[in-house]
Amino acid sequence: MKVTITGNGRIVAEKILNKGRRSHGAWGRMADRMGSLWLEETKRLSATQYASTAQLRKMGHPYAQRHFRAQGKKARAGLPAPSYFINRQTGKLLAGWKLDKYTGWRDIYLRITNPVSYFIYLHFGTRKMIRRPILGMALRFASRRYRELYEQAEREIHGM
């Protein structure tokens, strides 16, 4: 009888350990998929070309702060595209996106970076230009599929 209990206990412990090993890999793969989705959405938002520089100039520089500070009749009715769409001109911003993944003891961190010098001005804005929240919006669009990825990782861990 003692042998059976010990044997069952060992089997249960091995199953838990195996799930633990599967768990680590499954969560890592889920984080990779989440990061890929986020990067894909970020690239999609920065790949749009809806106006040339000359056309934006003719529109009166629609992303300038002065249009959003204006009161009354001078206030602009709207933007040619939502502020999180970045109008592609040279393609340097689009080509520069990179996903970094850091794995800690218990946590996985994802970070999207871009070495283009003017990205910080787009993201935070300047005193003359409105901010363009591309990373936050890309994360919001990508998060629509996160539940599906989470459930997929759960199935993988529990062997379903």
Image: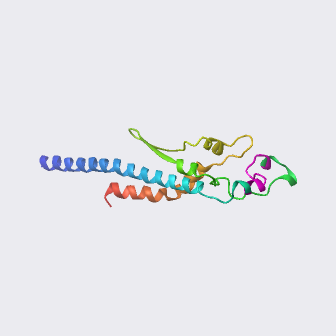
Q: Is residue 119 left or right of residue 73?
A: left
Residue depicted at x 65% and y 54%: 87
Seen as rendered, the residue at the extreme top is: 105
Residue 6 lies, with reference to residue 40, above or below; the image says above
Instruction: Give the total number of marks visible in the rendering.
Output: 0
Q: For residue 152: magenta?
A: no
Residue 49 at x, y percent in the picture:
63, 58
Q: Quadrant of residue 55?
A: bottom right
Residue depicted at x 21% and y 47%: 9
Q: Quadrant of residue 47?
A: bottom right
Q: For residue 63: magenta?
A: yes
Residue 45 at x, y percent in the picture:
59, 55
The color scheme shown is rainbow
From the viewer's side, name the closer residue of 150 and 113.
Answer: 113
Q: Is residue 67 left or right of residue 37?
A: right
Residue numbers of the magenta segment: 55-67
From the viewer's side, name the closer residue of 16 and 118.
Answer: 118
From the viewer's side, name the closer residue of 19 and 28.
Answer: 28
Seen as rendered, the residue at the extreme right is: 73
From the viewer's side, name the closer residue of 3 and 97.
Answer: 97
Residue depicted at x 58% and y 49%: 93
**In the picture, which quadrant includes the C terminus?**
bottom left
Residue 5 at x, y percent in the picture:
17, 48
